[in-house]
Image (spheres, rainbow, N blue to C red):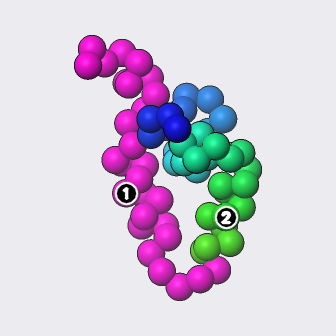
Amino acid sequence: MSRLARPTDNRVIGGVCAALARRFGTSATTMRVVFLASCLLPGPQFLLYIALWILFPSEHKVRTSTW
């Protein structure tokens, strides 16, 4: 499994679904469909997406980091 970072390519809005798909070894399309299907259920899905967008670093920042 790879590190959680929003990719610079294959983004649609923020890259959260693409990052999660890369982490769990699925396609980004599958992860996006799962997210959209979860939006039919009650809950704070959009708030979670925004929180993950803020918390996941961009892949560009991870590459340039000296750590």
Q: Which residue is mark 1?
A: 51
- Vertical relation: 66 (above or below) 7: above
- What residue is drawn where x is 49% and y is 70%? 45
- What residue is drawn where x is 44% and y is 23%? 60
- Vertical relation: 4 (above or below) 30: above
Expressed as whole percent of the image width and height from the top left, the position of residue 12 reads 64, 44
Direction from residue 54 to residue 4 in the image, left or right? right
* Dot 1 or dot 2, earlier in sequence: 2
Q: Amino acid at mark 1?
A: Ala
What secondary structure is marked by label 1?
Answer: helix
The region drawn magenta spans 40-67
Q: Which residue is mark 2?
A: 34
Q: Amino acid at mark 2?
A: Val
Residue placed furthest toward the front: 1
Is residue 13 at all visible to an observer of this figure? no
Expressed as whole percent of the image width and height from the top left, the position of residue 28 reads 68, 46
Tell me the distance, in whole angstroms, between the alpha carbons under discs 1 and 2: 18 Å
Expressed as whole percent of the image width and height from the top left, the position of residue 48 reads 42, 64
